Image: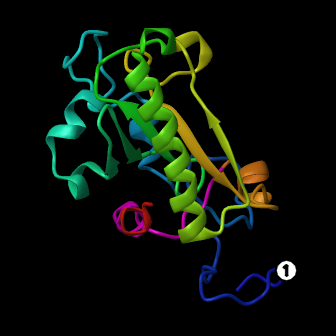
Amino acid sequence: MTPDLPDSPYQPEELVRQDGVGEPDEFMRLWTPHRMAYIEGENKPTSSEAGSGCPFCRLPSLPDADALIVHRGDAAYAVLNLYPYNPGHLMVVPYRHVADYTELTAAEVTDVAELTRQAMQAVRTVSGAQGFNIGMNQGESAGAGIAAHLHQHVVPRWSGDMNFMPVIAGTKVLPQLLADTRALLAKSWP
């Protein structure tokens, strides 16, 4: 054990030097290699056409548990985000492949709004969320990861959820598997 750190079952017996990474230090590291899929754009559609590899077009054809779909509405569905900002982060997605909010029909606008409201209720029931960030990134220049298929983010928030992990380490700790979160939310959907 290193003398400056408190005893921990997760602390290495000694620091391991790895060539090419600079000077060894006493920092513990949480590796999140699954995030590389998102960073490298894995499974990101290369075309803006409907069905051309668009995951939001493909997901409704899968069983809910496999697709992480929490609830299906008439014109839209709610699905967990594979790369969540916080536990319970989900998205409300119209079935129709449409890029811009102004292109939605009145029925789609209504369903997206209603599913967003229901998502907030379900997440509060399951996790006691104290607030939410709700929004859409319209276009690639605005930060939309999949700009060709509209999706609205519903991100639960709690007082103090911005601790040292995201601020200093650039890492989020998610305490539950997405499949378990989906099951809880689906069971609690109003």
Q: Does the magenta portion include 181?
A: yes
Q: Is mark 1 on a helix, strand or loop?
A: loop
Given the image, on which type of amino acid does mark 1 rest? Asp
Number of callouts: 1
Percent from the top left, x then y, of residue 125? 56, 69
Position of residue 93 relative to residue 53, above or below, is: below
Percent from the top left, x then y, of residue 6? 79, 86
Relative depth, front residue between 73 and 156: 73
In which quadrant will I find the N terminus? Answer: bottom right
Q: Which residue is drawn at 39% across and 15% down?
A: 105
Is 1 displayed left or right of 46 in the figure? right
Percent from the top left, x then y, of residue 62? 16, 45
Q: Residue 52 appears in which quarter of the rendering?
A: top left
Residue that mark 1 sits on: 4
Relative depth, front residue between 46 and 156: 156
Percent from the top left, x then y, of residue 134? 63, 38
Q: Which residue is drawn at 27% across and 24% down?
A: 54
What is the crowding at mark 1: few (fewer than 14 residues within 10 Å), some, or many (at least 20)?
Answer: few
Q: Residue at x 65, y 69 (%)?
A: 128
Position of residue 125 relative to residue 42, above or below, is: below
Position of residue 133 relative to residue 181, above or below, is: above
Q: Is residue 184 visible?
A: yes
Q: Which residue is drawn at 42% across and 29% down?
A: 40
Is 50 displayed left or right of 84 in the figure? left
The stretch in magenta equals: 171-184
In which quadrant will I find the C terminus? Answer: bottom left
